[in-house]
Image (tube, rainbow, N blue to C red):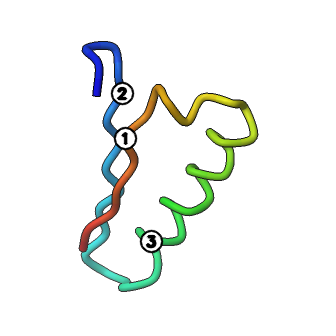
């Protein structure tokens, strides 16, 4: 991971499916834009 890598963490305490879904959607958007090497994407909660 380089210094200009952007970390994104989706956290939701109210619903076990919400944060993984947000992660998957955002990951797809980033991949479609060809920027997957610029982001570290994860979810928790």
Q: Horizontal placement of 26 versus 33: left or right?
A: left
| Label number found at residue 20 | 3
Q: CA distance from mark 3 to mark 2?
A: 18 Å
Q: CA distance from mark 2 to mark 1?
A: 6 Å
Check if mark 2's residue and mark 1's residue have beta carbons within 8 Å: yes
Q: Identify the image quadrant of residue 36.
A: top right
Q: Horizontal placement of 11 versus 15: left or right?
A: left
Task: Identify which residue is drawn at 66% across, 52% down.
Answer: 28
Secondary-structure class at tag 1: strand
Q: Identify the image quadrant of residue 25.
A: bottom right
29 w.r.t. 35: above or below: below
Q: CA distance from mark 1 to mark 3?
A: 14 Å
Secondary-structure class at tag 3: helix
How crowded pointer 2 is (Cα within 10 Å; few <14, some 14-19, many 20+) is rated as: few
- Residue 31: x %, y % from top left: 66, 42
Which image quadrant: the N terminus?
top left
Q: Nearer the viewer, residue 2 or 41?
A: 2
Task: Identify which residue is drawn at 37% across, 84% down.
Answer: 15
Task: Identify which residue is drawn at 53% across, 70% down.
Answer: 21
Q: Which is closer to the viewer, label 1 or label 3?
A: 1
Q: Identify the image quadrant of residue 44.
A: bottom left
Residue under pointer 2: 6
Q: Earlier in the sequence, mark 1 or mark 3?
A: 3
Residue under pointer 1: 40
């Amino acid at each position: 991971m380089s210094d200009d890598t952007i970390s994104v963490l989706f956290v939701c305490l109210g619903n076990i499916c919400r944060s993984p879904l947000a992660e998957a959607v955002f990951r797809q958007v980033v991949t479609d834009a060809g920027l997957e090497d610029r982001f570290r994407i994860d979810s928790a909660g």
